Amino acid sequence: MRRYRKGSFLFSLLMLVLVVAFFLTSLSYDQKDRLVPLVVLTPAVAMAAFAVAGELFPVLLRRSNTNVISLGQNDEQAESPAEVSDQVSRRRLFIVGGWLLGFCFLSLLVGFSIAIPVAVFLILKCFLGYGWLKSLIIAAVIWGFIYGMFEITLKYKLFRGMLFGEIIVF
Amino acid sequence: MLDGIGAAAAMLAQPLAILYLLLGTVFGWALGVLPGLGSIQGMVLVIPFTYGMNPLLAMYLYAGMMGSTFLGGAVTSILIRIPGTGGNIATVFDGYAMAKQGQAARAIGLATSASFLGTILCLALMVILLAIVMRFLMAFGPPEMFMFVLWGLTSCVVISRGNIAKGLVSACLGLAFSFIGYSNVSGTARYTMGSTILSGGIDIAVFFIGIFGIAEVLNLATKRATISDAKITVTRFRDAIAGAAETFRHKACCLRSAGIGMVVGIIPGIGGAVANLLAYLVAQQSSPKPETFGKGNPEGVIAAETANNASQPGALLTTFAFGVPGSLETAVLIGIFMLHGFQPGPMFLKDNMAIVWAIIFGFVFSNIISGIGTLALAGRMANITRINVGLLIPPVAVISFMGVYAMRGQILDIFAAFIFGLLGYGMEKYGFSRVAICIGFVMGSLAETSFHASVMMAWGSWLIFFTRPISLVLFFLSVLTLSLPFLIPLLRRRLRSSR
């Protein structure tokens, strides 16, 4: 419970930082360019600060909860797909989040043709616990589907990777 | 109004269109069955693949998906007590109760025919209303468009469930993201940090795929191995047909729920999730035996499923007529229109009726196809919930990233999608509205240009928003909507004390 609220507080803080960053950047533009952004971002900063305060003083957030449609006891009847415990959930989240980021960097360096089968194989074998053969087959199928769809059907060249000569424009 | 019907029908006669319609229907239905996924994820994932396609063909694919998702979601609601989509929550209450009493097939039949009736009735109503609305579209100028967007944003923040402060932050952040790039007003680059890529703004596909596709991958990581281990009842076709016929004996409930769904769909920014709950509530309170709701009353299933499907034509009406999304699905659809070169807004109907008719035909046929499939195979196909959800992670992630890259050929877009994915996951987990941020993002450009055009029309005065009647009415609607969370508890307390 504490971890959840800490996460909620940090995320609300992140949203406040984002909104404030937009707000402060807007001040540097001329009047016409900053008018609508400021009209939008001024209440957003206030609401974001309120949301952060609400994480520290939950009674504030409770008062601003919208429950325009309430079904009373029936609200509880529908289940959502079961999640695992918080600790397991965080561990899996970090692993899959790290895998996604790793896939991005691998694609940047060596291109999709190598990154896709390698990344898919790794997550199937190491995270999901599939065997060697099953992981290889599924990785090959996914790579084949992507290659077939893009290079053959859509005639779209997959990114080859910085190490193989592709240039990045930032 | 009938312009374009020939072109849409002629396209539908082609085998490729039928193939895409079938693919979209099956894909949408399967996504509806899988809780947590829905037509949104399906639509964003296929955006890159339809980019170069004939727009009419693409619309058949999307309409197929949108038309079948809620019915897919009803199957899991009834059979395993897990709503397949947000628009199927209320279906669980009586649908699962009926399944526990051995009447799963009957419940599925009720859901199928209710879905069909809701869609068909409200599509017909949508066509009639479009013909009427088209005559008044000329009265909608920039001030009205700005106020309509404002109402849409306040509606989606307030009327869906959640926290109003967090909802407003989400909506405003979505608007802020839409301002990144060259300003529509002056051409100045804003919030680009000197980057050439950001000068072009954030690509719609990158945003949506990140917020929904990549966020969903992260969400799947926290789920247990299979969605459900429950024994799934195999439904008999004969019983399902009997259930489907039973819906026609509850005409009043059907018509009332269709009306509620249509009205909810028309209100910008909210959609099936609110429609099904509201219709259920009204059906319960209108029933001579309200205590039977939640215990297997067929009107509980009929009300929920009629309304969620009826909300889609309502949302489409707002989208086609005003270019303002009536729901999250239509917000994605607006993004798709823009990618295909169509400008949403009041002039959309004048030039693009073929697109409108393609979507209408797509909805009708998708409902028919998914209805027949559901009646025949629901029990067997619900076994899809037994697959290991982890197995969905690699293909969803890879297809999402590939789709993002394919839009502009910029490898750095996949990093942007990853960042939006983290944002989308966090928003979902910590109570910030993804619906609001998406609608804000899609509507930001329209809101800003409408605002500046309005102020220019009035020679710099802001009073123009309050001196034009339609604009003033929309402003009051926005204020009323924002006041609802405070007014409704007050009304409830007064009602309770008066009893």
Image (cartoon, coloured by chain):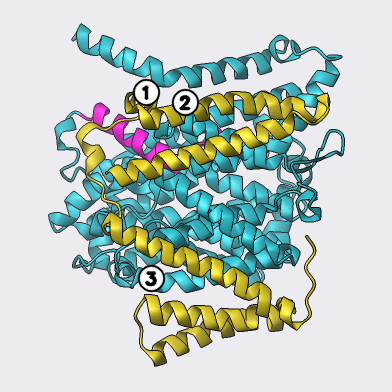
Chain colours: A yellow, B cyan
The kind of residue tagged 2 is: Phe
**Spatial separation of the CA atoms under disc 3 and disc 2:** 37 Å
- Furthest residue toward bottom: A133
User: Where is mark 2, residue-wise?
Assistant: A50
Q: Using a 10 Å C-alpha cutoff, classify the residue at mark 3 as few (fewer than 14 neighbours), some (14 to 19) or many (20 or more).
A: some
Question: On screen, B60 above or below A59?
Answer: below
User: Where is mark 1, residue-wise?
Assistant: A60
Q: Which residues are magenta?
A: B266-287
- Is residue B188 toward the left or the right of residue B6 in the image? right
User: Where is mark 3, residue-wise?
Assistant: B390
Both marks 1 and 2 on one chain? yes
Chain identity of mark 2: A
Q: Residue at x 32, y 17 (%)?
A: B489
The quarter of the displayed image where residue A163 is located: bottom right
Q: Residue at x 73, y 50 (%)?
A: B338
Position of residue B113 measured from the top left corner of the image (x, y, whole percent): 36, 52
Q: Is residue B295 magenta?
A: no
Is residue B371 shown to the viewer in this render?
no
- Is residue B320 toward the left or the right of residue B427 in the image? right
The kind of residue tagged 3 is: Gly
The number of callouts visible is 3
Q: Earlier in the sequence, mark 1 or mark 2?
A: 2
